Image (tube, helix red, strand yellow):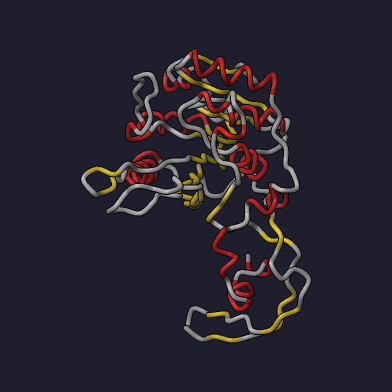
Amino acid sequence: MNLNTIVTSDNIEYLKTLPDGCIDLVVTSPPYDGLRDYNGYSLNLHGLGEQLFRVLKDGGMCVMVIQDSTKDFAKTLTSFRTIVDWCDNIGFRLFECNIYHRQGTEGAWWKKRFRVDHEYMPIFLKGKRPNYFDKEPIKIPSKHGGKVMTGANIRTKNGRTGSRKVKINPTKCPGTVMSFGNTCGGESKLKSKHPAVFPNMLAYDMIECFCPPDGVVLDPFNGSGTTTLAAKCLGRNYIGIDVSEEYNAIAKERMLTETIYRKKEDVPATINPLSLLLSDHQDLQHSETQE
């Protein structure tokens, strides 16, 4: 198995050449619903899911960024159909379905629908439990860190509630709604040559959280190379696959000229944007002592 490489190939056909159980983490975003022009390339999400399940190690994770298009005022449900198919028919389990909160189009012109400012991040698990999960690097500041507060309304299974004193930890695990600051090609002129990208820190955070230091990260739709670049910068092994020579050229140039790292301003950027609206009472409900 060739590591630390970017391959031009049909992803399913290339994955068939890899041995069983050789990948620790997949981070990817498929070209769903024809929302962008990918030079006419097609995809088979079911067939891809079968191969990803096979090459992942037991306890391995797959993070997907996906969204649905709108046709005749209704969502296509591509994201949900994929999640159900991969879990019911392939063998994955849904570890979590996070929301990637992104900036919607400013001054949106739609008169009969909402501005779309999110994408889904289903996180699939192979096996009973994650082989590696380290949330320490991606923790965010607690709003009331260091304080001792009373009033946490804890509800038990029998419906009873109660209050107690809680010391708030200075940091906490981010919630399931995640924001990553600058989300698109503005991070890099080179990166913006690809028609659809996700934030550098999305890949960076997921790799730190789910891939061991000596692990292997795979992106079967490598595109502009954000996943492979983040893996390289974090010292992980990587394999990037894309059928387009043009996109692979972008990814390879980024590997030589760009660096991703956690800046101070990146930490608050990952804070759940809804947390600013939470009361002290709600903060205590979701304090680190319960996570």
Q: Position of residue 270 (x, y in %)?
A: 63, 51
Residue in the picture at 51% in, 29% down: 55
| Residue at 71% over, 78% down | 166
**52 on left or right of 276:** left
Q: Residue at x 57, y 80 (%)?
A: 154
> Seen from this angle, which residue lies furthest right?
146
Image quadrant holding the C terminus, namely: bottom right
Q: Position of residue 223 (x, y in %)?
A: 51, 25
Where is residue 32? Give x, y as percent. Answer: 37, 34
**In the drawing, does residue 147 fall left or right of residue 274?**
right
**Closer to the camera, 252 or 45?**
252
Q: Is residue 18 above or below residue 270?
A: above
**Residue in the foreground of this view, choosing between 264 and 100:** 264
* In the foreground, 93 or 161: 161
Evaluate whether residue 89 shows in this view.
Answer: yes
Determine the residue located farthest toward the left in the rendered image: 72
78 relative position to 189: left or right: left
Query: Tag count in the figure?
Result: 0
The N terminus - image quarter:
top right
Compared with 105, 290 (above or below) is: below
Relative to 240, 159 lies left or right: left
**Res. 93 visible in picture:** no
**Residue 53 position in % (x across, y down):** 46, 34
